[in-house]
Image (cartoon, rainbow, N blue to C red):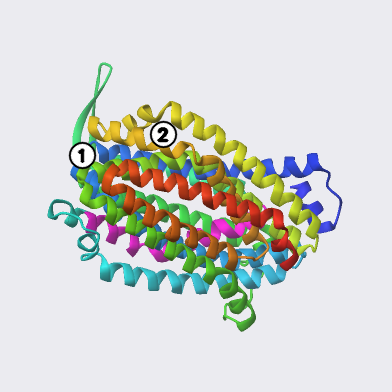
Amino acid sequence: MREIEQIREGIGLNFRQQLKLTVKLSIPAIVAQLSSIIMQYIDASMVGRLGADDSAAIGLVSTSLWLFWGVCSAFTTGYSVQVAHRIGAKDNEGARTVLRQGIVASSLFGALMAVIGVLIAVPLPHWLGGGETICRQASLYFVVFVAALPILTLNYLAAGMMQSAGNMKVPSILNIMMCVLDCIFNFIFIFPTREITLGNFELHVPGFGLGVLGAALGTVLAEVVTACLMIYFLCYRQRELDIVRHRGSYRITHPILKKAIHISVPMTVEHAVICGAQIAITMIVAPLGVIAIAANSFAVTAESLCYMPGYGISSAATTLTGQSHGAKRPELVRRFGFISVGLGMAAMSVMGVLMYMFAHEVMAIMSPVADIQNLGAKILKIEAWAEPMFAASIVAYGVFVGVGQTVIPAIMNFGSIWIVRVPLAWWLSTTMGLKGVWIAMAIELTFRGIIFLIRLFSKKWSAQS
């Protein structure tokens, strides 16, 4: 991409070129986010056809899975940010060195997290307050995903490394492919063998009829296939990061490990604490009943469509600010920060309006149960009001990560969710039920966006980079 090479070469970029480059990098990242979210919609919709209990089983452990996925993803960021800095400084051999060490470290970390996850899989649903009717299914769903964490962690690493090099297209295409595979595998694993009528034709469709377990197996299989292709493109086809033709040592060295820890540990701890808060919210919701658990889970999945553009633009912002920082262009770092956050807020405002207008229709996709649809639509309309400020926190966070500033943003994130959301959710749930929980969420997300904007406009983050 010619414009991103201008960053490395020190060539000036006007506002129009900066905006164009931000959009060009954001669109593939948004498509990748969209494919991931569609995959969640597919899982939720297929499992929703099995009934409220199966839907609640998945919803009960979903936040715990986010904890494991997010911690693994945050760990790999410590290496991908270093790659962005080295490529920005035109040090491709240094970038390859970071990649080799990142592969070893990420594999070991993913294996450690898998062992921890498998050990807690059986008691976890009981800890979360789940009833006996859903705990066994919840444990099965959880254990399949955590057992695959070593491969999934390498998938996060490969996607992050290619994005750091400015390659948003390949990860996006592979994520779309993963979405298609997820549809196919889930269709086979979830439902039993059956006959389907298409016009005048009768089709014999094979299936395993595994229900909740099948949903986990189908999705994990799609992710494993995608991870293998992602690693191939990263290590063989990505010019700046080709470690097949450019051989070197995979031994972990202290300077790179120290920098990775400096970047990723605050993010990892932050994500763990935030997911801990989300698990606490799940424990607040669990006593409200199966309908509330299912509606909450489906609404969280549905709402992800709103913040999909924010995370896509955040990925682009991390690449742009990271390479600008590596090229020692601080003014360009700041301009890309402001452009990215403004673009994210505009995009998520539009998505919030659409979600408010079509909340019931979206929930109807998730579940055929009328009570779940009605409750889910009500809480989605509450959340829609917070989307602009949620966008500010998402994209600004990506901006700060790009320059390696993760400690203060991490404190802002988990401070906001624990000090504002959790106590408020508990208090409001006692009188308003699930609606109170989501009102607390909307208030907290608005507060979080405000403090991230204050940090962005203070310029302290770029002065410290």
Q: What residue type is labelled 2?
A: Lys
Q: Check the image and name the residue furthest to the left.
A: 132
- What residue sits 84% from the left and 57% below the top? 9
**Label of residue 50 in the image:** 1
Q: In this view, does 408 lie to the left or right of 57?
A: right
Residue 162 falls inside the magenta stretch: yes
Which residues are drawn in magenta?
Answer: 138-166
**Label of residue 381 in the image:** 2
- What residue sits 38% from the left and 52% below the top? 424
Task: Of the two numbered discs 2 and 1 on the same chain, state the one appearing first in sequence.
Answer: 1
- Residue 70 screen position, x and y as percent: 45, 60
- Residue 31 screen position, x and y as percent: 54, 41
- What residue sits 51% from the left and 45% below the top? 33
Nearer to me, 290 or 180? 290
Instruction: Determine whether 103 is above or below 427 in the image.
Output: below
Instruction: Determine whether 415 is above or below 312 in the image.
Output: below
Nearer to me, 137 or 123? 123
- Quadrant in which the C terminus appears: bottom right
Q: Is residue 455 left or right of residue 151?
A: right
